[in-house]
Image: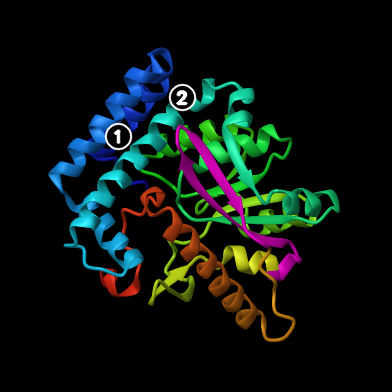
């Protein structure tokens, strides 16, 4: 039986619905200003989500959450986070030509080369920049792909977000509660020589692979590594960030699967290598890392 959505859940869903309806109809300069002001107001309140962002950024910078530089960085982080939502609401009405012209990309040749050879590609990315914008760019380049979505509350918001991404040309599978086995479907897509894109630095199942990340232990979802080991697909990290009013996307070199070891050992090795690449990307663009949740094991609340 599905839990009845709370008032807060219903308000969030209504807000998203209004955003997709109203934001594209208003002047972009006005709506961008409004989202920036909303980010600043939330930052000034210094609530739990902002404090968590500051704690996470302090680990990235190797300093204390009380460092004034972290407080300033978190303001830029909140502005970046709200910019993401502003762009999401405008994205369905954005011309493909604009998406293509404003995306500044590095290292994409290796992605195209693998796909041209009929080899599937797992694109693994942290929660940075505007991943939906990057997805729309990849589709506009002629490469529709498959991804996985976390179930949101209420269910109506999950369905609306799924429809939004499907409207951009993505195939969206639910992380949980789907009609088919998600891992098996992803493996099929990769064996058919198609791309798959997966968020990969935050484990939502408590069954992830433990890695060292900025000097402390966390868990990352095993999916990207397991798919690469299981199917032979290329595992390529992708780092997303904002570049002025445009967007940046850097594809790093393929992470090689070790020739020796058990499947578990191989997955652990490639996920640690992936974590290392993510560290580099987040260090270079910390303000565009949208991690407002607990991440490291020592910060997690005990499970009942």
Residue range corresponding to the magenta coloring: 229-253
Q: Is the residue under label 1 in contact with that under label 2 (CB below 8 Å)?
A: no
Going by the image, does 272 lie left or right of 128? right
Distance of label 2 from label 1 (alpha carbons): 18 Å
Residue 192 visible in the shown view: no
Per the picture, the main secondary structure of the magenta-coloured stretch is strand
* Nearest to N terminus: mark 2 or mark 1: 1
Depth check, front residue: 54 or 192: 54
Going by the image, does 150 lie left or right of 235? left
For numbered disc 1, what is the local secondary structure?
helix
Question: Where is residue 41 shown, x and y percent of the image?
Answer: 18, 36
For numbered disc 2, what is the local secondary structure?
helix
Question: Where is residue 143 shown, x and y percent of the image?
Answer: 72, 40
Residue 22 lies in the magenta stretch:
no
Q: Residue at x 69, y 48 (%)?
A: 108
Characterize the local packing of mark 2: few (<14), some (14-19) or many (20 or more) Cα atoms within 10 angstroms.
some
Which residue was labeled with disc 2?
90
Question: Where is residue 27 shown, x and y percent of the image?
Answer: 38, 14
Q: Tell me, for residue 241, which label it has, or none.
A: none
Q: Tell me, for residue 12, which label it has, or none.
A: 1
Q: Residue at x 28, y 55 (%)?
A: 53
Q: Residue at x 77, y 48 (%)?
A: 112
- Of all residues, the one furthest to the bottom in this rendering is 261
Residue 239 lies in the magenta stretch:
yes
Question: Where is residue 144 shown, x and y percent of the image?
Answer: 69, 39
Residue 229: quarter of image: bottom right
């Amino acid at each position: 039986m599905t839990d009845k959505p709370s008032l807060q859940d219903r308000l969030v869903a209504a807000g998203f619905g209004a955003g997709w309806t109203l934001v594209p109809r208003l002047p972009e300069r006005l709506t961008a200003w409004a989202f920036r002001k909303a980010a600043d107001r939330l930052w000034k309140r210094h609530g739990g989500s902002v404090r968590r962002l500051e704690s996470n950024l302090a680990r990235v910078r190797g300093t204390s959450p009380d460092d004034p530089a972290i407080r300033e960085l978190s303001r830029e982080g909140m502005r970046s986070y709200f910019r993401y939502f502003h762009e999401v609401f405008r994205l369905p009405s954005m011309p493909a030509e604009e998406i293509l012209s404003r995306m500044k990309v590095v290292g994409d040749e290796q992605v195209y080369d693998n796909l041209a050879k009929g080899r599937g590609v797992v694109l693994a990315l942290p929660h940075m920049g505007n991943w939906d914008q990057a997805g729309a760019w990849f589709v506009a380049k002629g490469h529709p792909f498959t991804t996985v979505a976390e179930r949101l509350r209420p269910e109506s918001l999950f369905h609306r977000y799924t429809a939004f991404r499907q409207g951009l040309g993505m195939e969206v599978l639910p992380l949980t509660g789907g009609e088919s086995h998600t891992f098996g479907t992803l493996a099929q897509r990769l064996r058919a020589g198609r791309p798959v894109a997966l968020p990969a630095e935050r484990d939502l199942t408590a069954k992830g692979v433990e890695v060292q990340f900025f000097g402390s232990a966390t868990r990352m979802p095993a999916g990207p590594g397991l798919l690469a080991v299981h199917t032979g697909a290329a595992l390529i990290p992708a780092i997303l960030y904002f570049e002025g009013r445009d967007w940046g996307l850097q594809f790093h070199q393929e992470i090689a699967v070790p020739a020796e070891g058990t499947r578990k050992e191989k997955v652990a090795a490639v996920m640690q290598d992936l974590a290392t690449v993510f560290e580099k990307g987040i260090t270079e663009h910390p303000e565009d890392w949208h991690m407002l949740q607990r991440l490291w094991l020592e910060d997690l609340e005990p499970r009942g």
